[in-house]
Amino acid sequence: MMTKLALTTTLATLLLGGTAMAETVKVGIAAEPYPPFASPDASGKWGGWEVDMIGAVCKAAEMDCTVVPVAWDGIIPALTAGQIDAIMASMSITEERLKTIDFSDKYYDTPTVVIGPKSETFAATPEGLAGKIIGVQVSTVHEAYAQKHFKDTAAEIKIYQTQDEANQDLVAGRIDATQADSIALDAFLATPEGGACCESKGAVANDTDVLGLGVGVGLRKGDDALKAKFNAGIAKILSDGTYDAVTKPYFASSIYGG
């Protein structure tokens, strides 16, 4: 006769398609809107390219994942403290971050650009930004890049908690330029207020020491099993067409990079 415990275990196994119940993987995203990668709708439900990519990668890797919004400047501490298990929040793979956390293979890689008023002509260079106030988001590769390359010539490097705050100050004329990922700033320039005021001033000179080697899943040091699962999921969606299917509604071409 089957015991009550054995029956319960068997039912759970059947309900899960023949596998034991997997522990939910908590995937952290930045709690601040960052369209088109991640933004909440009126009901508070998060959506966007990166949120869809989390679903696709986790499904391909046969992981049960849940999205957990975390304030950007506390997202790495949340990972290392075990409050979340992974980060998928447009986090670039850099040598500095690799001192604290590990990363999966990249899942996208796009240029870094500077935007500014249409009424002004300048380049995304230290000389072009001389005497200007440049806005960047805190604890990003863009803050690090601006501090390294523009601090000596700019009038001020102004730090914001969110990229949206920097964008709004640019519209209001409180800063002269802002630097961020090209896709995120393209989304802002596609809005009525962004398109009316501003334009791209071009991509900054590449510096992989600061800007990194693309965007990957942030993971705790030593969590090799989870890293292998994410890498397998990323590889699978790249090979079976899912990556392109997820990307098509958001972008005209792949953002995976070279």
Image (spheres, rainbow, N blue to C red):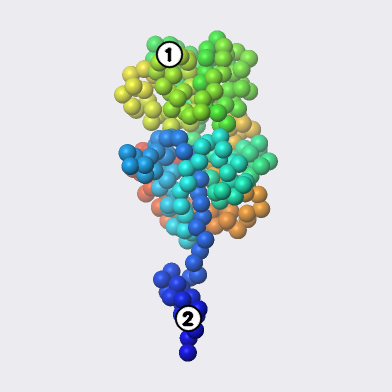
| Numbered circles on residues, count | 2
Q: Would you say 98 lies left or right of 243 here? A: right
- Which residue matches tag 1? 173
The secondary structure type at the circle numbered 2 is: helix
Residue in the image at 36% along x and 17% along y: 197
Q: Would you say 206 lies left or right of 244 here? A: right
Residue 29: where, in percent of width, then height?
48, 42
- Residue situated furthest bottom in the rendering: 1
- Residue situated furthest right in the rendering: 99
Q: Would you say 192 lies left or right of 61 here? A: left
The secondary structure type at the circle numbered 1 is: loop
Q: Residue 188's image quarter? A: top left
Can residue 236 be seen by looking at this rendering?
no
Of the pair 134 and 233, the residue shown nearer to us? 134
- Which residue matches tag 2? 4
Residue 7: where, in percent of width, then height?
46, 80
Identified by mark 2, the residue type is Lys
- Density class for disc 1 (Cα within 10 Å; few <14, some 14-19, many ≥20) is few
Counting residues from the start of the chain, the first of labels 2 and 1 encountered is 2
- The disc placed on residue 5 is none
Please, is residue 13 above or below residue 151 in the view?
below
Residue in the image at 33% along x and 42% along y: 43
- Density class for disc 2 (Cα within 10 Å; few <14, some 14-19, many ≥20) is few
Residue 213: where, in percent of width, then height?
58, 39
Can residue 76 be seen by looking at this rendering?
yes
Please, is residue 12 above or below residue 59 in the view?
below
Q: Would you say 236 lies left or right of 148 here? A: left
Residue in the image at 54% along x and 23% along y: 159
Residue in the image at 44% along x and 43% along y: 50
Please, is residue 7 above or below residue 239 in the view?
below
